[in-house]
Image (spheres, rainbow, N blue to C red):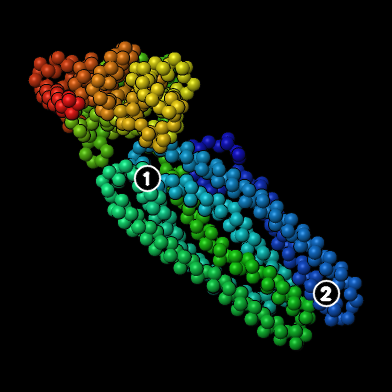
Amino acid sequence: MGSSSTTAAGRRRARTSGRLLLEYLLRYKWRYLFGLLALLGASFVVMVPPIVLGRAIDDVSAGLGGGRLVRYALIVLALALFESALRFASRMLVSGTSRRVEYEMRNDLTEHYLGLDQSFYLQASTGDLLARCTNDLTIVRDLIGPTLIDAARSVVMLAVGFAFMLAVDVRLALIAIVYMPLIIGLVAFAHSAAERRYLAMQEQFGELANRVQESISGIRTIKAYAQESTEIATFTESNREMVRRAIAWNLFTGGIWPLMIFSVGASTVLVLWFGGLDVVSHRITIGQFVQFNAYLAILAQPLYASGWVFIGLQQGFGSFKRVAEVLLAPPAIADPPAPTAAEHRFAGTVAFEHVTFGYGDRPVLRDLSLQIRAGETVAIVGATGAGKTTMINLLTRLYDPRSGRVTLDGVDIRTLPLESLRAAIAVVPQESFLFSESVRENIAYGRVGAPASAVREALDVSQFVNDIEQLTDGLDTVVGERGITLSGGQKQRAALARALLKDAPVLVLDDALSHVDTHTEEEILKRLRDVMRQRTTIVIAHRTSTLTSADRLVVLEGGAIIEDGTHAELLARGGLYARFYRRQLLSEQLEQERAQEAAG
């Protein structure tokens, strides 16, 4: 639907939300042009019947025959049909096109969401982003559809109507619009205040949507801690604030409608008074007086509508500003202008060269350097906050280092296309995410169309194959939102199978077996050893079995590497790793004893 030749990246070069909106509309300029021409034609046609009516009244007053009245009636009927056809064509062209523009905007917004970096999502709320993609875009569609039609119709009809009124009598026409400068001034004065109130209402709507989303996503935790009443109270307060802001907006804009009604009434009184005197003094005929009042009645509708148009414009432009805030937000992590092409499959040599990085003012990694050879398995050990996961985030370019560089096969990853870089790395995070799709689709997510033999091998290595038989529809079982129907261990094994099936040269296991029992972990590690020999593997783990399977161990403390060597070498040194290993070994022994006692 619509032109797709202009890329999203090119569209984001727009400097303002107004230019961005204009770019969307210009793609359908001919549809909008013909729609507005049809509207202009209808506005002229609707001004003709009062002329016919005026002449008919003057003919009747002059005592002319009824044959003319029949002719006048047929002319008015034909004009009404012609006007209806033009208005229908105008509304279909403009409103139908607004649906297409909405479709393109929603696609572009979703595409842009997926291209934005991690730092953007740290500052944004899910509910607010959903509100911009749904509620705000619906209001924008009304802006460029029905509201645009009504705005154009009001402006054109008022201009054309005033011209026809001038043709009847200049003095009466000026009397009829004597109040207009006051109304224009009041509307202009109210513009910025109305926009502030509307944006405040939409921001609270996003907060409300976020509260609902969090309550639904966290329903297990809410029920486990019996916090239903607390959540209801919090939501009620947020909902009350939403109502307060909505009432403030409605009270402010509600004055527009009575103002328009009063202005039309005042204009009618003035025209009746001065026009009646003109008829008595024979300045104008009765037919002209009726014709003039007919124009006034016709113009009452666009005047009334202008109040709603003002509200619609405030809502539409306010909502588009919220949408444009996202569309115009440049991603901090993007493809380089002239990316380095990967001529062959990466071998998997990873290096951190004097890397410094921090999420805020406090650095997490300090001048860190590490070389990982292709095919080597390296385990990263350290306390919480030492920077282990941060290293993975830098390797996958979720963030870029403040100084230093990360390389893959000697190439700075910032010079590589993001798609090529991330295709070379398979990550299994501690908190595994599964989509609300079938098990098969989740496992094949990184390699759509993988052969059944490869899927079976990945399931076998991850030890998820036995669980498949217990699921209702096997591999075709839909796992529910975020994989809610699976246990933590099952989700981790499904995520591991997904990473293995991807067959990337670099495999990252970020505490990926923390929810798996000890026996299953040992079975997985046995099968993983062959896989690890074929690719570079970076392991973040705490269990002793996982640590001892690594070729090398790197110990982080305070964002710097303080120990580097094999398991035996680090134990012999008796440093931080040796102490950590002994504590972990003791903890696992106690855990096994408790499990045996519980089983006995």
Q: Secondary structure at mark 2?
A: helix
Residue 312, image x, y percentages: 53, 59
Q: Amino acid at mark 2?
A: Ala
The quarter in which the N terminus is drawn is: top right
Residue 79, compared with residue 511, is above or below; it is below
Q: Which of the 4 image quarters holds residue 421?
A: top left
For mark 1, what is the residue? 216
Pick the front one: 13 or 358: 358
Q: Residue drawn 57% across and 45% down?
A: 101
Name the quadrant containing residue 592: top left
Report helix, strand or loop for mark 1: helix
User: Can you name the residue that lies furthest to the left here?
Assistant: 574
Q: Is residue 138 left or right of residue 539?
A: right
Q: Quadrant of the C terminus?
A: top left
In the figure, 469 relative to 90: above or below? Answer: above
Q: Residue at x 44, y 46 (%)?
A: 130
One can see residue 336 in this view? yes
> Label 2: which residue?
56
The crowd level at tag 2 (other Cα within 10 Å; few <14, some 14-19, many 20+) is many
**For the residues bearing labels 1 and 2, Cβ distance under 8 angstroms:** no
Q: Position of residue 57 (x, y in %)?
A: 81, 77
Spatial CA span between label 1 and label 2: 68 Å
Q: Residue at x 48, y 63 (%)?
A: 191
